[in-house]
Amino acid sequence: MTPGKLELLTSWLPTRPWYVSTGAVPALSVAGGFRLDDPEGEVGMEFMVVTDASGDRPVTYHVPLAYRGAPLDGAGNDDRAALVGTSEHGVLGTRWIYDGAGDPVLVAQLLALLHGRAQPQAQSETDTPDPSVTRHGAEGPRPAPTGPGTVAEGGDGTVVTVPTDSGPAALTLVRVLRPSAPDPARICVTAPWRLPDGTEHRAPFAFLDV
C-alpha cells in the first residue's frame, strides 16, 4: 500500500487526545495485532499495535483500522469516524482507512468478539485463527447493535456508546497499552504485543459494559 500504514499513522496519531507527545516525529514500528473478518466480505479490519520509539521510553498504541473500498457514508475528518487517510493498494485500488472506533462494521464485529460470536484471525495470515487473542469475563446478555455508535475521545482512550436491542452498551478501546491483567468484573479481550527489545507483554485491548 502506498502510502503505508505506518506513514499514515505517523501523521494521524499526534492529532489524537490520548497520544503521548514526545516532542519529536513518531518513530513507529509494528508491535502486534490481529484481524476480524467482515461477514459480508466488504470491510477489512485490523487491530494494529504500534510502538513509538521517538521518546526516552517506548509508548505502545492500539489502533483499530477499517479498510474500505469507498468512503464511509457520513464520515470525514471528525471524531465520529476519523479518516486516517487513503492509500493505493496494488490489487484493490484506492482504500479509505478509518479509525475503527467510528466504523459501524468494525464496532459490530468487536462486540461479536466480546460476546464470543467472532473468531480473531492472525494479522498476517489468511484463514488462520489467532489463539493468543482471548476473551475474559462472565457470560451475560449478548445485545446486537441497532445503529452507529457515538464516539467520545479522552486522554485514556476511546468510548463508543452503541445502541443495542437491549439498551446502550459502552465499548471502551484501550489506546495506550501497558502490561496489565484483565478485570474479572468486566468483559474484555486481551492480546499480546512485542517491544523492539523483544520483550512480550499482554493487556486488555477492549472492555464492554452493558
Image (cartoon, helix red, strand yellow):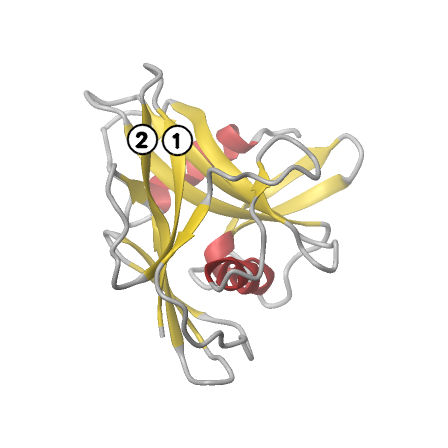
For residue 49, above or below residue 52: below
Q: Quadrant of residue 24?
A: top left
- Graded by Cα atoms within 10 Å as few (under 14), some (14 to 19) or many (20 or more), the crowding at tag 2 reads some
Q: Quadrant for the C terminus, please.
A: bottom left
Label 2 to label 1, Cα distance in Å?
6 Å
- Graded by Cα atoms within 10 Å as few (under 14), some (14 to 19) or many (20 or more), the crowding at tag 1 reads many
Query: Mark 2 sits on what residue?
Result: 201
Marks 2 and 1 close (CB-CB < 8 Å): yes
Q: Quadrant for the N terminus, please.
A: top right
Which residue lies at the image location 72% right of the left edge and 34% below the top edge? Answer: 89
Q: Position of residue 88 (x, y in %)?
A: 70, 35
For residue 31, above or below residue 96: above
Closer to the chain start, of discs 2 and 1, is 1
**Is residue 82 something that shows in the picture?**
no
The dot on residue 193 is: 1
Which residue lies at the image location 50% right of the left edge and 29% below the top edge? Answer: 6
**Is residue 104 something that shows in the picture?**
yes
Which residue lies at the image location 29% right of the left edge and 21% below the top edge? Answer: 54
Q: Quadrant of residue 117?
A: bottom right
Q: Position of residue 116 (x, y in %)?
A: 51, 60
Nearer to the camera, 209 or 158: 209
Q: Position of residue 204 (x, y in %)?
A: 33, 47
